[in-house]
Amino acid sequence: MQLVIREPRTLLHCAVEPIRPQCLATCHHVGEGEKANAIRNAVEKVLNIDNVRTGGLGGSATTKEFTAATERRLA
């Protein structure tokens, strides 16, 4: 069985939130706010500047294409 991720942006958001210091009041964070913000900024640039969007956001990019675009922004 293959796992298909329809909306990688949501998955990344869920992964980033616990490492942001701003969520200290609501959860245990791990103090990696800089990294979390870098990921969040990369995703926003991929969506709003590069216009790479998966089907869930009205685009045609695959999850692999979205991930590759995000990785390029993080490099």
Image (tube, helix red, strand yellow):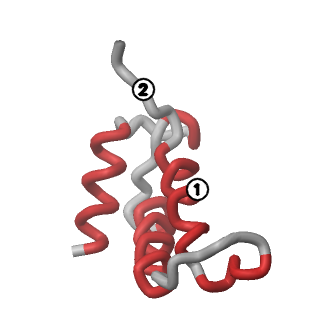
Amino acid type, residue under disc 2 in the picture: Val
Q: Quadrant of residue 46?
A: bottom left
Q: Residue at x 57, y 36 (%)?
A: 56
- Image spot of residue 33 (x, y percent): 51, 84
Q: CA distance from mark 2 to mark 1?
A: 17 Å
Q: Which residue is mark 2?
A: 4
Of the pair 52 and 33, the residue shown nearer to us: 33
Q: Image height check: is 53 above or below 49? A: above
Q: Image height check: is 36 above or below 62? A: below
- Image spot of residue 21 (x, y percent): 61, 84
- Image spot of residue 13 (x, y percent): 56, 59
Point out the residue furthest to the top here: 1
Amino acid type, residue under disc 1 in the picture: Cys
- Label 2–label 1 contact, CB within 8 A: no
Q: Residues within 10 Å of mark 2 (few under 14, many from 20)?
A: few
Quadrant including the C terminus: bottom left
Q: Residue at x 50, y 71 (%)?
A: 40
